[in-house]
Amino acid sequence: MLPIKLRSARMFGSGNSALEDVFVLAKPIDFSKWIPIFPLPNGVLMPKAILPLHVFEHRYRVMTRDALAGSKLIAMGLLKPGYEANYHRLDTAVYPEVCVGRILREEQLADGRFNLLLQGAARARIEAENAELEYRRGRLECMLPIPASPETECAIRRELRQLLSNPPLVQLATKANWLELLSCPEFSLSDILDVLASTALPSSQDKQRFLAEPCVVGRASCICKVLHAIGSQMPQCAPQKRPRSWPPKIYTN
């Protein structure tokens, strides 16, 4: 059996504020140490996004206990197609680009399983792996974002706000807290794009390609195209008819 996501993640927790729990990530990551790698066939974590996980395989229970006792870091990786025959091996092929996440909340069940909320902290690339334990560990290299120029960033932010503040996307953007995200001063443009990608991109392969792209301008182009595509598929709102008054007006001669 495969470790699977519990459900679709709601961005930024479930409290009254859409930005609840985001700022616990302001902790440095020591990339000189081995970091656990948790490969999934269909789950891609993005920086700043939150991924709910149900951990039940023995080796990943061990991994979770070790992470909780230490840095609380777990790198999420995506298994390459054809993984099924070798799923239980430690050398099953994964894409080299991963997202290092930090355990935000945990719940250990009576039988040893875990429910986790894992929040993405940084892009990274696997440089080496260690198979000494029951689970995979990697020596990772941080993939820093390649920023846009100030002028280009302003233009991208304007386009995003224009797309999300007007029909046909405004209702979806409001429900998904995308507009609140745009107004958060603590979020860089790279952060905003990553969180949008975590919910807007349709497949794990699309998300993996996005994760592998450090260039902010390239990611912005991808997200704007996806938002335009989503908007084109949404039904256009027809003008509302005024309700007929009742009782009807009585005409006299």
Image (cartoon, rainbow, N blue to C red):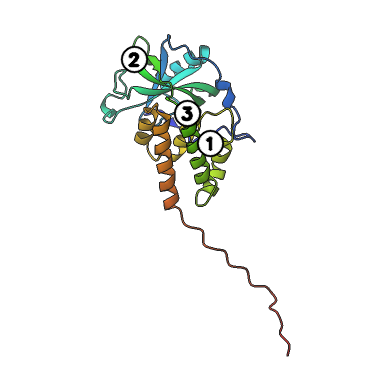
Q: In the displayed image of the protein, which residue is found farthest to the front?
A: 151
| Residue at x-position 39% and y-position 19% | 37
Which quadrant of the view contains residue 77? top left
Distance from disc 2 to disc 3, alpha carbons, whole Å, reads 25 Å
- Left/right placement of residue 73 relative to residue 137 reads right
Disc number at residue 127? 2
Q: Quadrant of the C terminus?
A: bottom right
Q: What secondary structure is found at the residue carrying circle 3?
A: strand
Q: Position of residue 28 (x, y in %)?
A: 52, 14
Q: Disc 3 marks which residue?
A: 53
Q: Are marks 1 and 2 in contact (CB under 8 Å)?
A: no
Farthest right residue in view: 252
Q: CA distance from mark 1 to mark 3?
A: 13 Å
Callout 3 amino acid: Leu
Label 1 CA crowd tier, 10 Å (few <14, some 14–19, many 20+): some
Q: Nearer the viewer, mark 1 or mark 2?
A: 2
Q: Position of residue 155 (x, y in %)?
A: 48, 38
> From where the camera sits, is residue 42 visible?
no
**Whole-Å distance between the Cαs marked 1 and 2?**
32 Å
